[in-house]
Amino acid sequence: MADLALNVRGLSVSYGSDGDRVRVLHDVDMQVARGRALGIVGESGSGKSTAALAVLGLLDKGAAIDAGQVLVDGRDLYAATAEERRRLRGGKVSIVFQDPFTTLNPAIRVGRQIAEPLMMHRGMNAAQAEAETLRLLTEVGIADPARMAASYPHQLSGGMKQRALIASALGCDPDLLILDEPTTALDVTIEAQILDLLEELRRTRALSILFISHNLGVVSRICDDICVLYAGRVVEQGPTRTVLSQPRHPYTKGLLASLPSLSVERRRLEAIPGRLPDQRQPQPGCIFAARCHFAQARCTAEPQALADAGNGTRNRCWRSEELQDTPWRVEAGASVERRPPAVDAPTVVDARGVARHFRSGSFIDALSLRWQGWRPAVAYRPHGVRAVDDVNLTIRAGEIVGLVGESGSGKTTLGRCLIDLVSPTAGDIRIDGQSLLAASRGAKRALLRNAQIIFQNPDSSLNPRMTVAQIVGRPLDQIGASGTDRDRRVRELLDLVRLGAGYADRYPHQMSGGEKQRVGIARALATRPKFIVCDEAVSALDVSVQASVLNLLLDLRDAFGLAYLFITHDLSVVSYVADRICVMRHGKLVEEGATASILGAPQHPYTTALLAAVPRVRLAEAPVRPTA
Amino acid sequence: MAAVPAIDAAPRRRRLPTSLIVGTGLLGAILLLAVLGPLLSPYDLDAMRIDLRLAPPSAAHWLGTDEFGRDVASRVLNGAQSSLLMGFGATAVSLAIGVPLGLVAGYYRGWTDEVIMRAVDVMISLPPIILGLLILSVTTPSLWKTVLAVGFVYVPIMTRLTRSVTLEVATEEYIQAARARVESGWYILFREILPNAWPPIIVESALRVTFAMLLAAALSFLGLGVQPPASDWGLMIAEARPFVTQAPWIVGGAGTALCVTVIAINLFGDGLREALDPRLSRRR
């Protein structure tokens, strides 16, 4: 075979103790040719992180390699002695993890954290290691490496930390760099910079890259080849461009169809129904059959082998050739048209001059003691930040307003001000014409029945000690529903969010992320509100699930004339869902306008920068080729 | 319409954790012995036999005799009531005061938090014995006052623990959701936060029961708790300390009773924590 930096052959990995083993990788094959980049994409539970750890030989104690080989530079990682393995790992392979905020030790200067492995693995002395550290930091695009090396991690931004971690990974001059969701925790403009840096490094260093991500846009930008993982199996692999432009496996088709793209054209998203199969149960047939739109009897009976599709790609679907030109389409007959809100719709939310300042430090810290002659004078002087600064915003009935901005822009605080979770320092908020801030407690409760919220994190937004019926029923208790009437309405709400009454007695831990998010939506809908703040409501969900929740939110809007304030960092999602977009930066609205005009002709330079940074699934142009 | 995911096996009925079953059994047996103790004991608890001082275990005296020739087995049986009362009573007192204070401090923050926690700091700065002495010496000693005093001593620990768990739980989005419905403070503290704050509190309480028994014993030893010749495990251990090399059975009898009780309480606490947590229910 050609010169391979990494060759994984028939790798199977399982977790757990003897009686209860769960196989998380099944017969995985993947190759990274020298100087090329392979992207592994998959949703949560697909086994992509396990694959990365297995390649490094860093699996947990509970994990076992059941079969297969990992050849790094032609040598079998798991047949090697511990010492050889350590040398392979130190010299040939490096990894950059997802979260730059926790990967660096907060108590040690950045420079030392980079220099340490240089001294350990490359036998440098302190002075050499320091010089090399500065050189590495320059290489990853740090303008003032000496200052960076002398800093503690908390003094650096997320993007800077990720650069430092990449510098550290490059320290031992690896041939293969593994990147496990390296940009997921970063803002979109920073993400674009890091991706540029990786492309640059790949060219100058002739690096081979194994890039793990859930984001098809990011992968299509960086990688030559792609490997789609589903439930621990490679379902399709091949050159990125071919796989994304002519997907052959139904799962790949589904993923692409559920991806909102940054465009003015409005097609309805096609979700993938169902959820990941329970990996404890043996699956005799195709692993995707249960969710597959095209499944036939043969699919559930026979396991699918990875077969050549003839166009340079391979996939695990016996019907792939026959279905080659059939797109993924689940929701046949659903309305494709989306209704714009009526021009004369009444105003639901009217915020005028809203500001919110946060003081930092405790109450005691804000007290300052001064002496006026012989008399002490205590003054209350809080230090603070202006999270929201003089914002005007109106939302009409049935309108979806997207609020975008990067982390720290104040978009979440603004959303919480509108439903009284945070009280504004200044300004006036009217819901349905009535002032929220001037209302008494009882009046507020009545007002807030019209204004509710859906949260980001499905794991945190439901009380783990309550059943679904208790969670959804509580707002009904508050408005005095009881007995059979209450039960009936709980069932109606569950039907409305397409869960069904069977979910009533479940606890949150018995549901998947998408199901939990639906319960959160049902809870918000219980009091029949007119306005809902969706605070990153789909950000924590996998693409296929995200699509179905977005569709649900849009259907609910069409059915009940709900208005949403859709807060997100994801411009593709907002461009899909919103009628109007507001761009927020440093607590201020910097641009506001209809979705089409913001996307088509952004006025503010910040909006332009945001839009340019969004990674898209690009099919027209080839990824950058390494020259070396 | 998105397809409704198939509903897989309905939530299974949960099996009680083994530790809860064993813990409850042991604790039940101990409580039964404590109640029936005075009836079961073969000798009067303060019947002295000068000729049988510090006698080793024998057929007549299963656990031997103490320095006054009193039957150790009878004294252990009779001492159970006051010991358990001390342990559980004091812990209940500290829970009843400490948990609500911790919830309020951790949820409302701001100056409420400052006031409560600074007051707690002052209490913590006094050694437990001194604090207990302070409370008991101004009034005439009685069993109930010792229970109150010991419970009061452990309030700061419960408050601080509850506050730290509350701080964590209060950041969860379901608390925000409750606030968005304008729920009352009472509902949020006791219905939303407390059930999720229980696990560490239960574990700590199981520990506190033992510490409370020992602190009560120390106070009794100083003459401020159980009055001799009444019997109490802690007091027995404290009084028998000088004879531990000559007559280890006195400390051994009371100590074993204390140990078994502690293990029972810990098993019970652990099992209760597991049984109350829907996430920890057995899946197999």
Image: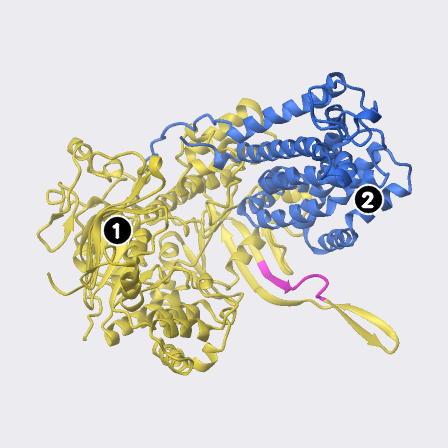
Chain colours: A yellow, B blue
| Callouts 2 and 1 on one subunit | no
Which of the pair A49/A607 is nearer the observer? A49
Q: Quadrant of the N terminus of chain A?
A: bottom left
Q: Quadrant of residue B211?
A: top right
Magenta region: which residues? A352-366
Tell me the number on the disc at residue A256: 1
Which of the pair A41/A570 is nearer the observer? A41
For label 1, the SS is helix
A357 in the magenta segment:
yes
Seen in the picture, residue A58 relative to B246 is either above or below; the reply is below
For label 2, the SS is helix
- Can residue A406 be spotted in the picture? no
> Which chain hosts label 2?
B
Q: Main secondary structure of the magenta part?
A: strand
Seen in the picture, residue B114 relative to A235 is either above or below; the reply is below
Q: Which residue is mark 2?
A: B132
Q: Residue at x 39, y 42 (%)?
A: A514
Where does the image place residue A557, in percent across and percent down from the top left? Answer: 42, 43
Q: Quadrant of residue A494?
A: top left
Residue type at the position of mark 1: Leu
Seen in the picture, residue A170 relative to A443 is either above or below; the reply is below
A387 in the magenta segment:
no
Q: Residues within 10 Å of mark 1 (few under 14, many from 20)?
A: many
